[in-house]
Amino acid sequence: MVKAHVTVHLKPGISDPEGNNTLKALQLLGFDGVVAAHTTRVWTIELATKSKDKAKEQVDAMCRRLLTNPVIHDYTIKVE
Amino acid sequence: MVKAHVTVHLKPGISDPEGNNTLKALQLLGFDGVVAAHTTRVWTIELATKSKDKAKEQVDAMCRRLLTNPVIHDYTIKVE
């Protein structure tokens, strides 16, 4: 069994409405010290294989087909 | 400036429809080797303070007030 962690984040320059709205909400709640808020999504995928290389290749294909939007997202894959 | 990373994940036993649907979708796309899929959200919060302890305390309050749902979420805070 191989576990892969895929970290999906926005490409530089892409606007981050979720982060911006969270920042505004935190400031409205009285947290004046906050200057930035961003969010990242981490997928944990378990695969029934023993080869880490094969797992990484498969997870990369999953990212391209389902987990990420190549127009706005960058991703990194960590296999353990 | 202090940067805090908040990792939000579901409590054990809480159903994970997003993970389950991703698992089903990946299997429908032909990725037969996948046995589990889960998602975690990571918030990156930047604070205009120099005290790491104070930052951690503030971020903990943010989690309780906005970033997490205490009924279904556990969270960990890492300050750097």
Image (tube, coloured by chain):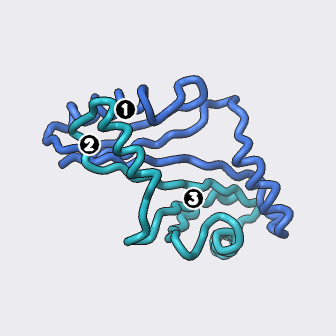
Chain colours: A cyan, B blue
In this rendering, position of residue A18 left or right of residue B31:
left
When asked about the image quadrant of residue A49, the answer is: bottom right
- Distance in Å between CA atoms under marks 3 and 1: 26 Å
Task: Please state which amino acid type lies under the numbered disc 1.
Answer: Met
Task: Name the mark on residue B31.
Answer: none
Q: Which residue is mark 3?
A: A5
Q: Which residue is mark 2?
A: A34
Task: Report the chain holding disc 2.
Answer: A
- Distance in Å between CA atoms under marks 1 and 2: 10 Å
In this rendering, position of residue B58 left or right of residue A46:
left
Q: Position of residue B53 (x, y in %)?
A: 21, 32
The kind of secondary structure element at disc 1 is helix
Callout 1–callout 2 Cβ contact below 8 Å: yes
Q: Which residue is mark 1?
A: B62
Q: Residue at x 35, y 49 (%)?
A: A37
Q: Which quadrant of the rendered structure holds the C terminus of chain A?
A: bottom right
- Mark 1: few/some/many CA within 10 Å (<14, 14-19, 20+): some
Q: Position of residue B43 (x, y in %)?
A: 42, 47
The kind of secondary structure element at disc 3 is strand
- Mark 3: few/some/many CA within 10 Å (<14, 14-19, 20+): many
- Mark 2: few/some/many CA within 10 Å (<14, 14-19, 20+): many
